[in-house]
Amino acid sequence: MAEVKSDVKVKVANPQDASIDAATQMMIRRAQSLGIDTCFDRNVTLKPCNIGNQGTCCKNCGMGPCRLPLTKDYDEANDTRKGICGATANTIAARNFIRMIAGGAAAHSDHGRNVAEVFLTAARKESEAYQIKDFKKLLEIAPYFNVATTVEKDGAVLDRDLDEIALEVGEKALEEWGKPEGELHYLKRAPKPLYDTWKKAGVLPRNIDREIVEIMHRTHMGVDQDYKNLMKQGTRAALADGWGGSMMATDLQDVLFGTPYPLTSEANLGVLKEDHVNIVIHGHEPVLSEMIVAMAQKPELVAYAKSKGAKGIQLSGICCTANEILQRHGVPLCGTFLQQELAVITGAVDAMVVDVQCIFQNLANVAKCFHTKLITTHPIARMEQDNVIHIEFDEHHAIEDAERIVRMAIDNFTNRGSDVIIPRQKSPIVAGFGVESIEYHLGGTFRGTYYTLNDNIINGRIRGIGAVVGCNNARVKHNEGHIAVVKELIKNDVIVLTTGCNGIACAMEGLLTPESAKVFCGPGLAEVCETVGIPPVLHMGSCVDNSRILLAATEVVKAGGLGTTISDLPAAGSAPEWMSEKAISIGQYVVASGVYTVFGAVFPTTGAPVFQRYLFEEMEKMYGGMWDFEADPVKHAWKMINHIDAKRKALGIDQARERVMMDFADRQALEA
């Protein structure tokens, strides 16, 4: 284990100040007693750069870094700050901001590309591991790629061969990353007024890779030096993420692995089992983890685990790989982004299998203190430490790779020490909601639309919709922002849609059960949840699955009564504890889709007030949505609620509506 010098007093985190979660606090204490540093301790000893936080440090050339802090006596009219090349604070902040968009869009879209490649492998029948599971969804998405689902023969219209459709969809999807002309196919899934807004603003993405590359070109020293023009390209790249790479990743994963529907599971470190082989899957891509789920259920491997003295194999997940395998298989959530080191510190994890994004390199150092095998699986994501095992995933040998990993974990069970301490905390959850299941629960098969959801928004039982998503950030108290924002929203009858680590935080807090509505919700939302049997917080998947939220919003518009485009809806977005570049890309495509979006923790443009005002005010005039920032979680939630109320007033639904019993004839007349 890491040794702490006795003559040096090392600053460590106060567990109560670091997290609201008891299991997390317990594992922080254990780590400190063993002399193992975690992200919580490093947060105490490593202070952030104030100028970097403001977004006004430029290191895009060898003459820098040029640091342009906001002065205490800042005067906008006389702001003479400039770098060696003359770049202003607004130019520097805008360049930094859209480089974050490029990084986030690249991460999500590369995920989507990987899924598209595996999808094409399945369509070509080149792998036994992957087959099309949801042909209904395949037929639903095919027309968006201009792929015909029927064929005319001898004057008759016949259903087209499903294998042919799958192959053409796979080919068309993969072209979206690099086609030489045109625009992304999925853009026309947006409400037409929104599509027209993008077209008028000149931000329709051409292909995914081009938009990311163009950001890197524009932000090179001496190229684009107008913050408005820089943000135009940032918007184009962000839309290529949200309505391109991410949306295709979600759809193709549904076709390959099955469209999620509600199921039950559990969340928090307490899902680990002392008498089982524990395999924790961490990262963001479900392509390999799907195979690990299958192998962990294989009878001969379960028997092999029992031969080693274990009672079985327990799979659990961290971050968005966790959300992916939860929503399709009910695999429990081990924890959020900030709990990854703590899972190993239980001493119970026999293997942690990681793919891409949000993975701490320090996991390797923590694993050295225990018996845990740390296994990297992706060619673009390796670690330098010598105790890390690399098993590179290949879709053509996915079953063999997954079985090798599971066997390695089973063999390692016998090396487990006696110092296993697993927190008891875990919460029951209902997860796996999507566009289809929300339609089923709130619309019903009778009507087949989002009518009932819209009706309950119009009559005021549901005040509006809050999309609360995003990462954890060690600079703020773990899960406090997530939970405070969500509880304030549902207390005020705002139904919450969630993805990513916010979804895991809500799961740990017990907010993903129908029963929680009675405890935490206002009377209107509680009534809806009780009647329909849903939680007040709907878990919609991983961070790429924010595309599900966009499509759900589109369905609300289609159902009628709440305006003609997404910006008309009584809805708002939030990322209370964001930390990754992906969050900035998500935020920009949500804003550009017409949604008022509030971030917590910090905001990377505070050193350039003119540019920040452009994001916080001018964006709304262009796209109907805009950015905002509020670190205090309750004030953060009320910014969202106030926006929702303003949208209700604009729609003329701010007054309570009398409840009227409707017979079948009334409903027919309404539908007409």
Image (tube, rainbow, N blue to C red):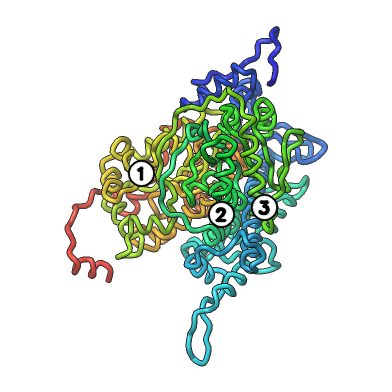
**Where does the image place residue 369, in percent across and percent down from the top left?**
67, 25
Q: Is residue 45 above or below residue 438?
A: above
140 relative position to 522: left or right: right
**Where does the image place residue 613, in percent across and percent down from the top left?**
55, 41
The answer to which of marks 1 and 2 sits earlier in the sequence is 2
Q: Is residue 617 above or below residue 161?
A: above
C-alpha separation, residue under disc 2 versus residue under disc 3: 34 Å
Which mark is drawn over residue 507?
A: none
Can see residue 559?
Answer: yes
Residue found at x 70% / y 58%:
210
282 relative position to 424: left or right: right
Q: Amino acid at mark 2?
A: Gly
Tag count:
3
The answer to which of marks 2 and 3 sits earlier in the sequence is 2
**Where does the image place residue 89, in percent across and percent down from the top left?**
67, 38
Can see residue 232?
Answer: no
Which mark is drawn over residue 242?
A: 2
Quarter the C terminus occupies = bottom left
C-alpha separation, residue under disc 1 versus residue under disc 2: 25 Å
Which mark is drawn over residue 400?
A: 3
**Residue located beneath label 1 in the image:** 536
Residue found at x 66% / y 41%:
408
Give 509 or 128, whichever is nearer the viewer.
128
385 relative position to 349: left or right: right
